């Protein structure tokens, strides 16, 4: 099996302290450098295409851009929307186009007088700034990481940081799956107790998912039909498992002195 390097991180050997006294480390990511260069090239390409379309509108016979301020506003909207204000230099060229029409109605002749009308037309030309593009390329792939943790190495910090979205996703379940809403509590101890209960709930939820996924790995089960229409689910969540058993009901039937119990699942695997 051929292993392929997905990303290569390089960290500055000299650590810097922020104004608040936290650790500040500077990293360079080869993957981020590729993404930054690709994004910048795409933004420049899209901005150039929109400027070309705007120029065609300016040169068209039914152009409504009669004032320079309106053209400048349209150009700035394009540059700002594509975030290339510092990379593209756009020049607005003002031209005068003369047209002639008859002073009076009727069939033209040698004595027909014409009235000259001058209308302003605008044209666009743009160039990329090589100095600013070089400055942007020099910063591709570079990002800072600030932390108050002192016992982690420069290699362990980004690994811990990348686990943050997982933790945030867990806390988002408080408002979605568990429907936690604002509650008025009189003392701080009650607030702590309520949060502790939901913290234990999150732990149980995580343990359920881990046990289920480990069992699937032991039994070599790649997926479970938990999604609608029986579609495969490779990484089942606690929410899907609870929804699966939500329709299972226990009915107790009593006939005279005899008592019998029956389980009627509404969802069958």
Image (tube, helix red, strand yellow):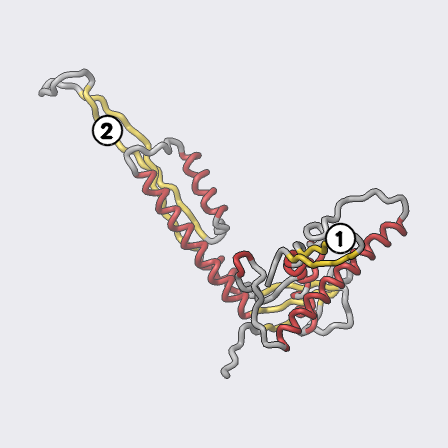
Is 93 left or right of 17, judged from the image as shown? left
Q: Which residue lies furthest to the bottom in this view?
A: 1
Residue labelled with disc 2: 99
- x, y (%) of residue 21? 78, 62
Q: Which of marks 2 and 1 is nearer the N terminus?
A: 2
Residue labelled with disc 1: 255
Judged from the image, the secondary structure of the residue bearing numbered disc 2 is: strand
Residue 160 against residue 98 in the figure, above or below: below
Residue at image x 39%, y 45%?
91
Relative depth, front residue between 33 and 221: 221
Q: How crowded is mark 2: few (under 14 residues within 10 Å), some or many (20 or more)?
A: few
Q: In which quarter of the image is residue 239?
A: bottom right
- x, y (%) of residue 225? 56, 63
Relative depth, front residue between 259 and 236: 259
Relative depth, front residue between 143 and 151: 151
Is 237 left or right of 92, judged from the image as shown? right
Residue 121 against residue 222 in the figure, above or below: above
Residue 228 against residue 65 in the figure, above or below: below
Relative depth, front residue between 160 and 68: 160
Judged from the image, the secondary structure of the residue bearing numbered disc 1 is: strand
Residues marked 2 and 1 touching at CB (< 8 Å): no
Q: Quadrant of residue 237?
A: bottom right
- x, y (%) of residue 158? 66, 68
Is 151 left or right of 266, judged from the image as shown? right
Q: Quadrant of the C terminus?
A: bottom right
Residue at image x 77%, y 44%?
182
Mark pair 2, 1: CA separation:
102 Å
């Amino acid at each position: 099996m051929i292993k392929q390097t997905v990303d290569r991180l390089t960290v500055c050997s000299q650590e810097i302290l922020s104004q608040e006294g936290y650790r500040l480390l500077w990293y360079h990511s080869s993957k981020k450098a590729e993404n930054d260069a690709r994004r910048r090239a795409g933004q420049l390409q899209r901005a150039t295409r929109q400027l070309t379309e705007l120029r065609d509108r300016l040169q068209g016979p039914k152009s409504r851009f009669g004032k320079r301020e309106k053209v400048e506003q349209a150009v700035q909207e394009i540059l700002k929307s594509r975030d290339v204000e510092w990379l593209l230099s756009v020049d607005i060229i003002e031209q005068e186009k003369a047209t002639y029409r008859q002073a009076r109605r009727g069939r033209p002749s040698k004595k027909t007088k014409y009235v000259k009308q001058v209308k302003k037309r605008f044209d666009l030309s743009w160039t990329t700034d090589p100095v600013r593009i070089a400055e942007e390329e020099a910063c591709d792939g570079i990002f800072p990481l600030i932390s108050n943790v002192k016992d982690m190495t420069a290699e362990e910090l980004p690994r811990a940081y990348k686990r943050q979205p997982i933790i945030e996703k867990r806390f988002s379940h408080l408002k979605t799956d568990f429907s936690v809403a604002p509650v008025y509590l009189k003392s701080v101890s009650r607030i702590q107790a309520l949060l502790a209960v939901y913290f234990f709930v999150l732990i149980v939820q995580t343990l359920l998912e881990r046990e289920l996924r480990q069992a699937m790995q032991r039994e070599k089960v790649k997926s479970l039909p938990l999604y609608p229409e029986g579609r495969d689910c490779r990484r089942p969540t606690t929410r899907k498992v609870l929804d699966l058993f939500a329709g299972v009901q226990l009915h107790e039937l009593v006939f005279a002195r005899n008592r019998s119990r029956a389980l009627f699942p509404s969802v069958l695997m």
